[in-house]
Image (cartoon, rainbow, N blue to C red):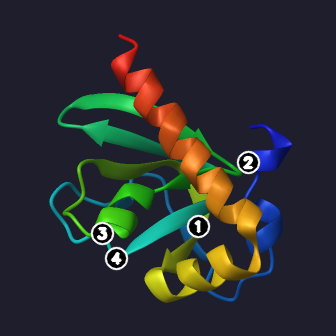
Amino acid sequence: MEPERDFVRLFRHSPDAKTLAAGSVLFETNEPGDALYVILSGQVEIRIGDRVVEIVGSGGIVGELGLIDKAPRSATAVVVSEATVVPVDERRFLFLVQQTPFFALNVMRVMADRLRSRTAH
């Protein structure tokens, strides 16, 4: 992942970090989107139905769409290899957007990249 999109440095020492075993479900389709997750280590698959649409690793984020638009989750996120993640709820997200503008810009870039990759096929 490009250094500018590496969210790890902002969350490296977060007391909210959780380590999840391979096979753990981070969130499922149609659940409320009340947080995004920063992946500090490991890998998480994003699945729509039975199809894997992306594998996100260290430095990436998942679940941002549900947090931003308040709609139910559009995908399921499953841990592929043991992963440490940090949940970012709306309150923390708003704080980060105000205090660390590059955070918001990089979340938007991730969303734009995902949109482009889905529509390019």
Q: Earlier in the sequence, mark 2 or mark 3?
A: 2
Q: Which mark is residue 17?
A: none
Placement of 41 over or under 11, stated as above or below: above
Across and down, in percent, residue 9 comes to 83, 65
Question: Which residue is drawn at the image coordinates 81% and 47% (left, top)?
Answer: 4
Q: Earlier in the sequence, mark 4 or mark 1?
A: 4
Question: Which residue is drawn at the image coordinates 22% and 72% (left, top)?
Answer: 32
Across and down, in percent, residue 64 comes to 44, 59
Nearer the observer, disc 4 or disc 1? 4
What residue did someone put label 3 on?
33
Placement of 51 over or under 39, stated as above or below: above
Contact between labelled residues 3 and 1, with CB atoms less than 8 Å apart: no
- Amino acid type, label 4: Asp
User: Secondary structure under badge 4?
Assistant: loop
Marks 4 and 3 sit apart, C-alpha to C-alpha, by 4 Å
- Amino acid type, label 1: Val
Marks 1 and 3 sit apart, C-alpha to C-alpha, by 16 Å
Contact between labelled residues 3 and 4, with CB atoms less than 8 Å apart: yes
What residue did someone put label 2 on?
5
What residue did someone put label 1 on?
85
- Amino acid type, label 3: Gly
User: Is residue 41 visible in this depiction of the protein?
Assistant: no
What residue did someone put label 4 on?
34
Q: Earlier in the sequence, mark 4 or mark 2?
A: 2
Marks 4 and 1 sit apart, C-alpha to C-alpha, by 15 Å
User: Secondary structure under badge 3?
Assistant: loop
Classify residue 71 by image quadrant. bottom left
- Amino acid type, label 2: Arg
Q: How many marks?
A: 4
Marks 2 and 1 sit apart, C-alpha to C-alpha, by 16 Å
